[in-house]
Amino acid sequence: MISVNEHALDVFEEMMDFADELKVGVEELANGTTIIDAGVNEPGGFEAGLYLARICMADLADIRFASMEIKGRSFPAIQVTTDYPILACMASQYAGWQIKVDKFFAMGSGPARALAKKPKNLYEEIGYEDVAEEAVLVLEGRQIPDEKVAEKIAQECDVNPEDLYIAIAPTASVAGSVQISARVVETGIHKLETIGFDINRIKHGHGIAPIAPIVGDDVKCMGSTNDCIIYCGRTFYVVEYENLEELKEFLRKAPSETSSSYGKPFYVTFKEAGFDFYKVDAGVFAPAEITINEVKSGKTFSCGRINEDVLLQSFGVEVI
């Protein structure tokens, strides 16, 4: 079985080799853990974000830059194609690990989750277990982890701290924005999983989403980066699912527009909810448009719509 951590470590080491060109910093903590800073104290950039996305997906996807027109204006975009959608997206990329140590907090995604089994029920559902001596993790956060944080993560992954490799970028950074938009395929799979679809039926995935500009602090950028997928993310999946009527019912429930929290920039919705995630309908975290090709029948179904107006509002675009 493919080791997502072994695959990702190759990308991590390549990122270290090109640290200067990628405008990232590399440091080794006293306990031997290696840290790549792609936007906390170092500038990072688009290419650094592409590397973060490759690490998150264990290099099991073709990830490249593109452009998207939104109301006649051109914005950078990220395009993702994978023949390993469940392994790359759910076993690796999904941001399913909250790292909390004292005052430190960050969202963890990437291959190390498979070693720590975060969350355990997901790995049982997809039937995947990684066996690796090194752990590779991507953090979305504002603070560089220290030895205590690294030791906690290493312990959860059952590896030595010197065999732990962490890359980090804040939400309000170019690299952070890129790696979040690169979750477009994963977001659609996760939404399908939450409504009861057997995601193991998904055999291939493709998607594209615009990359948000920096619009303010991390909370505001959390809104705009999510809006890229919610309002303009487009995905295509190849599945094997014999019951076509059932498949269409799942598809009708999947796009973001089915959510009660749909219709405003996410930051506005979040603010109105008193910045309480539990008061926001989680169903809004889905691509705007989802298309499914069922290979055995040769049928293709599509649902959802692009909403450019809300995304431009989220970006705060001022045409002058």
Image (cartoon, rainbow, N blue to C red):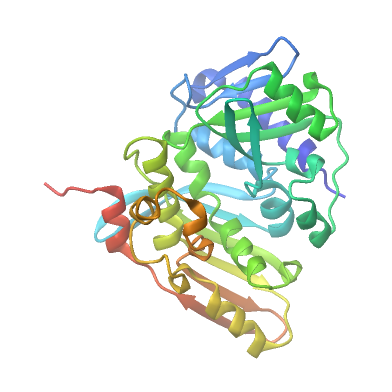
Figure check: 135 above or below 224? above
Q: Residue at x 56, y 68 (%)?
A: 236
Figure check: 147 above or below 239? above
Q: Residue at x 80, y 60 (%)?
A: 126
Q: Residue at x 58, y 61 (%)?
A: 206
Viewer-side residue, 53 vs 118: 118
Figure check: 157 above or below 65? above
In percent of width and height, residue 279 lies at 47, 58
In percent of width and height, residue 306 lies at 38, 68
Q: Is residue 46 visible?
A: no
Which residue of the protein is positioned furthest toward the top in this rendering?
30
Viewer-side residue, 57 vs 187: 187
Which residue of the protein is positioned furthest toward the bottom in this rendering?
245
| Left or right, 262 with reference to 160 | left
| Left or right, 50 with reference to 311 | right
In percent of width and height, residue 96 lies at 66, 47
How many numbered discs sit on the rendered protein? 0
In percent of width and height, residue 191 lies at 59, 65
| Left or right, 65 with reference to 56 | left
Q: Quadrant of residue 292?
A: bottom right
Q: Is residue 161 visible?
A: yes
